[in-house]
Amino acid sequence: MTALAFAASRRPVRVSATRSSRRARRAPAAAWEIRSFAAASAAIVSAFVLALAYLAGSTGVSSGGYEAQRLQGQRDELRRQNALLELEVAKLAAPARIETEARRLGLVRLSFIPVVDAVPLAARR
Amino acid sequence: MSGLSAARLRTLFALFAVLTIILSVRVAYWQTVARGELLARATGQVRSDEVLRAQRGTIRDRSGAILAATVQLRSVYAIPARIKDKAAAARSLGVLLGRDSAPILERLRSDAEWVFIQRRIPEAAAEAIARLGIDGLGSILEPKRLYPNDDLAAHVLGFVNDDGAGQGGVEGRYDALLRGEDGTLVVERDPADRGIALGLRQAVAPRDGAALTLTIDLAVQTAAERALREAIDRERAASGSIVVLDPRDGAVRAMASLPTFHPAAVATATPESLRSRAIAWEYEPGSTLKAITMAAGLDTGAVTPSSWYDDKGYADIGGRRLLNALGRAWGPTNMTQVLERSANAGAVYVGSRLGAQRLYDAIGTFGLGRPTGIDLAGEVGGTVRPLAEWYPVDVGTAAFGQGLTVTPLQLACAYAAIANGGTLYRPYVVASWRDADGEHRTAPATTGRVVSRETAATLRDMLVSAVDNGLAQGARIAGFSVAGKTGTAQIPSPDGRYVDDEYISSFAGFAPAIDPSFVVVIVLERPASKLLGTTTAMAAFTRVAQDTFRYARIQPDRRP
C-alpha cells in the first residue's frame, strides 16, 4: 500500500444523516445566529442612535453658543450706540451750546427778573 | 498551494498583530504618558487668552449731566496688500476723515502688513468708511475718554493719558476708583474666531470703575467760566481763576482757571494751561485778607466795629511806613470804614492791636498756609512764613494781605467760614460714587470753628457795608444783599521787590448776605486797567451771582 492509498484509507467515512435529524440539529444553531445577529444589530443601532443623539446635542449646544455670542455682540453694539447717544444728548444739552443757539436766534438775557413777594399774595387769599 | 496560502495568512496575521500592538502601544503612550503635551499642543492652537477691559467710570455733575465718559470708538486700519486701487481709496478716506489724502496714500503704499489709518474716529465717519466696502479696510473698537462739554471744568476733571491713567483733577485723584479692575477670559476659538461653546471657558469678569457724581453744577460752572473769560478778555489779563463754593458745607459748585485746555486733546495743551490756578496758584491776596484780619480783631476783642483811629494815609510799623492806596488820608475812620475804604493803615492798626502771635494764629486758623485738603490732585498750600521769621513790619503787611500767599480756593474757604457763621469746611468736589457695593456719599467735613457766630455775623454786616457804601459798590445786585471785599495786590519780582505797576486784582464775596447760598472768589492776573482791575472782577462776580440766583431760584432778600 502506497502512502497515498494509506491516506485515502484513513479518510473519515462520511456518514449520511437523514433530513429530519439535520433539521433538528440546525434549528437551535440558526436561532442562536439570528438572536446574535439581532442583538449585535440592536447594539450597533443603539450605539449609532446614541452617537447621533450626542452629535445632535453637541451641535445644538455649539449653535446655541454661536447664537449666544451673536446676541452678545449685538447687545454690546447696542450698548455702545446707547453710550454714544447719551454723549450726544449731553453735548446738545450743554448750557453753553443752548446759550449760543439762543443768541443765534436773537434772544437776549433778562437784565432783571421781577420776583413777586409770596407773603402778601397769600395773605390776600 | 493551500499550504502556501496558510503560511501567507499566518504571516499577514502576525504582521497585523505586530502593527496593532505597536499602534496600541503608541496610542496608549499618547493617551497616558504624553497626554498632557498633546493636550497643550491642541489647546494652544485654539485657545485664546484675552484681557477684558474694565470700563472707566462716568463722571457727572450734581444734576446727573455727563461731564466725562468712556466710549468705544472705531479705529480704521488697512491691509495694504489687499487694496487694489490705493490712490482712489486714499482719496475717499481723505474726504471722509477730513484729512489730506497724501499721508493716507503713503501709508497704503507702505510695505507694512497692517497699518492704522486713523484711530478713534467719529461714528458717522466710521459708518461712511464701512459703506465704501473697500476690500482691505477694516476697523476695531478702542476706548476713548470723551468730554461732551469740551473744555468746561477741565481743571476739575483732569484728563486721561494714552496709557489710560487719570492725571490731574478728579481723574487723577480718583483714578483707582474710576479705572476699575480688568478681567480675563480664556476661551477656545474656532477658525472663524468664534468661541467654542463646548470648549474651555474660564472667565474672571472685569469690575467696571465707579461712577462719580460731583458737587459741580454744570449751569453755575458755565456761568462762572463765561464771566471769567469775559473779564480776562476785557482786561487782557495774563490769567485768572474763579471759585464758587457753597458755604453751608464746602461743596464746590464751580471752579475754573484760564488759560485752560481740552481734556480730550491734552497733546496740544501748553504746560501753563494745565495748571489749575484755583488750587495751585499762590498769589498775594492783598486787601481781600483784611476781612480775616478784622475777624481776628473782632473775635479777640482787639477792636469793635466802632473802634476808630485817625487815618493819616499811612501807618508806621517796624521802622517802615506803609501807605494807603494812592496815599489817601481818610481822617477819623472806624473799623467798618476800614473795610469800606480798604484802608491799609486801618488794617495795620488792627494788626498792631492784635500783635504778631494772634494775627499769625488767625491766619492759620482760617486755613491759610496749608492745603485745604480738597479731593483734587495738585493742590498747593500757599506760603505763610513761620512766626519766628517775621520782622516787625510783617504784622502790618500781613494785615493787608502782602508778604504771604494764598490760593483762590483757600480764600473762598475763609470767606465761606465768615458766611456760614464761623465754621471752616474742607472743600470737596466728589459728592458721591457708585460701584458694585452701592452708593457712597461724601460727608461734609469741618476743620473747626474759626470765629464765634457773633463775630461772623458782625463781620458779615461790615462786609455788606463795604459793598453798599464802600469801594466794592460795583458788586451790588438789585434785590439782594451782598457782602464782599476787593483786593489789589502787588506782584513779587524774582529780586525780592515788587513788579512796577502790575497787580493782581480780586474780589471775594457772598450772597445773599443774610443767608448765603454761595461764595465767589475771582482773581485776575495783571489786568490792563491796573488798579481798576477790581471793577472788572466785581462785574464778573455780579454776573455769576445773578445767573446763580436765577438758576437756583433764590428769592431776593431786599426790595430793589
Image (cartoon, rainbow, N blue to C red):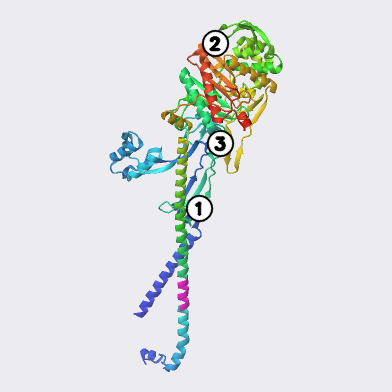
Please tell me whether residue A30 is drawn above or below residue B157 in the rendered image.
below
Residue B168 covered by magenta stretch = no
Residue B66 on image: x %, y %: 50, 36
Marks 2 and 1 share the same chain: yes
The amino acid pointed to by label 3 is Thr
Q: In the displayed structure, does residue B203 sit left or right of residue B13?
A: right
Q: In the displayed structure, does residue A5 sit left or right of residue A91?
A: left
Q: Nearer the viewer, residue B302 or B263?
A: B302
Q: Which mark is residue B213?
A: 3
Using the image, name the chain to which the residue with label 2 belongs.
B
Residue A42 covered by magenta stretch = yes
Name the mark nearer the viewer: 2 or 1: 2
For marks 3 and 2 on the same chain, the one whose residue lies earlier in the sequence: 3
Q: Which mark is residue B497?
A: 2
Using the image, name the chain to which the residue with label 3 belongs.
B
Residue B119 on image: x %, y %: 40, 38
Which stretch is magenta? A38-46
Identified at 64% across, 17% down, the residue is B462
Identified at 36% across, 91% down, the residue is A5
* Disc 3 + disc 2, Cβ < 8 Å: no
Report the residue marked by disc 1.
B201
- Splitting the image into 4 quarters, where does residue B345 fall? top right
- Splitting the image into 4 quarters, where does residue A100 fall? top left
Name the mark nearer the viewer: 3 or 2: 3
Please, what secondary structure does the residue beneath circle 2 have?
loop
